[in-house]
Image (cartoon, rainbow, N blue to C red):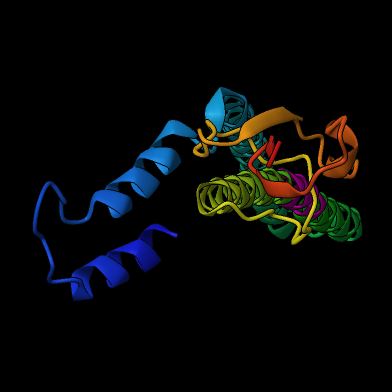
Amino acid sequence: MAIKQFERESMDTDLGGNKKKYEDTLEELNKVKAMGDPFGDEYKNQMKSVREEQLILLKKFHELAVKLDSKKKILKIRRRLVTIVIGLNYVIGTVGVLVHKVLKKREKDLDKQKEEKILRLQLAMEKTSLKLVFLFSLTIIVFCSSFGDAREMAKEEVNYIDGKCPDGKKNCNCLPPVAPVMDSYKIIATCHRDIECIKFCPKGCKIVNCKFGTCFCEC
């Protein structure tokens, strides 16, 4: 709405009298400003908690990776030492080969375990990221709906000023009352819009004017 007002006022070169340029544009922008921060403290707190949760997961992943790498390094040293000992002692060569296979298998198991742990941590981080995206999308939807309501209210205010019903009805009770402008006629009563105005006049005379909440007659 503010952009439309800006485009309309940019083409308007008539600035005579007390008219201020871009007055309607500034009014619409002030309405958007009055709506406040669309994200609010609740979204910021939720985003902060999600960030803290991700940092905790990253810290756990780092500690787990260091621990598994340390175990893997120790196993490599042991395997090499066993290989050296078996090489020096041919008699127990068969046992050395068996121990070497066992340690090699254990090393592969640790690698597999490390990959599984990493995969689980990645899935947990993806879930927290999806949660953050969902909260952001929900906030944008709420902000857009609030902005749409503000635009509708602005349209209704313009219709009230023009004396038109926002719903397009000829006889409605949604328009605010306006001071009477026909002093030469008698004011019958305040019109309720859903009742025929002729019923308000006790003599049943002709209704001269019935606008903006006040009925006038010729008597």
Q: Residue at x 57, y 48 (%)?
A: 147
Q: Farthest residue in the left direction?
A: 16
Residue 61, percent across and down? 65, 39
Q: Looking at this view, is 22 or 196 the one in front?
A: 196
Q: Looking at this view, is 53 or 21 the one in front?
A: 21
Magenta-colored span: 116-129
Compared across the picture, whether 82 is left or right of 199 comes to left
Vertical side of 100 occupied by 81: above or below = above
Residue 212, percent across and down? 63, 41
**Residue 33 in sight here:** yes
Compared across the picture, whether 9 is left or right of 103 comes to left
Q: Looking at this view, is 151 or 36 the one in front?
A: 151
**Residue 78 in sight here:** no
Q: Residue at x 82, y 35 (%)?
A: 192
Residue 134, percent across and down? 72, 49
Q: Main secondary structure of the magenta part?
A: helix
Q: Residue at x 91, y 37 (%)?
A: 199
Residue 58, percent across and down? 60, 38
